[in-house]
Amino acid sequence: MARNGNNPKRRIAPPERLTEDEKVALTEAVRYVGSGHHKRNPADYGLQRTNPRPTKSLCDLERTIRLAEAKQLVASGIECGLISEPQANGFPKFIWSVSEHGEVFEAKTDTHGTGEYHGYPLEDEDDMHKYVKSIWKERCQNAGQ
């Protein structure tokens, strides 16, 4: 299924891109830290403050996503191979996942390549929303996720 858009960093890598061992190593290496730019409520993220930007999606607009769930969403995305092509530092710029509520999330690494990620929901209007859901269904739901 072709996806509209032209950002090569925002494309899901082929399912065979990472071996099972590489998925485990990546899951252990990434750290989910959250971002005050995507939150109204700091919840249990240890953020000093929140400062939602008008141009950013709020991850807690519909409900509060606790840190443990955010970490699990990132781990599930890696396990199902919903990552962008890894960069030179070994970390993909993006990791995608779908919650048990059917919400589509995108986690993005920081610009310094430290393996720290923050995430946010993808709006229904975003072309990636539908694309991620279809790939999730193909790779994850069929695998019992």
Image (cartoon, rainbow, N blue to C red):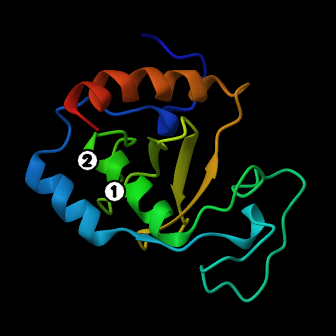
Q: Is residue 60 above or below residue 114?
A: above
- Residue at image position (37%, 24%) is 137
Is the residue marked by circle 1 packed among few (<14), some (14-19), or many (20+) residues within 10 Å?
Answer: many
Q: Quadrant of residue 45?
A: bottom right
Residue furthest to the top: 1
Q: Is residue 57 left or right of residue 6?
A: right
Q: Is residue 86 visible?
A: no
**Disc 2 on helix, strand or loop?**
helix
Residue in view at x 75 percent, y 49 percent? 62
Q: Amino acid at mark 1?
A: Ala
Above or below for 38 versus 57: below
Q: Is 11 left, or right, of 54 in this rendering?
A: left
Res. 64 in view: yes
How many numbered circles does the render carry? Answer: 2
Above or below, comparing residue 2 to residue 90 in the picture: above
User: Which quadrant, please, contains the N terminus?
Assistant: top left
Q: Which residue is mark 2?
A: 79
**Residue that protrudes farthest toward the right in the picture:** 54
Q: Check if mark 1's residue and mark 2's residue have beta carbons within 8 Å.
A: yes
Along the viewing direction, whichever of 76 and 53 lies nearer the viewer: 76
Front position in the image: 132 or 61? 61
As shown in the figure, which amino acid type bears the numbered disc 2?
Glu
Residue 85 percent coordinates (x, y) = 35, 42
Image quadrant for the C terminus? top left
> In terms of image quadrants, where is residue 14?
top left
Q: Residue at label 1?
A: 75
Indicate the position of residue 119 as horizontal and vertical percent values: 58, 57
Tag 1, which secondary structure? helix
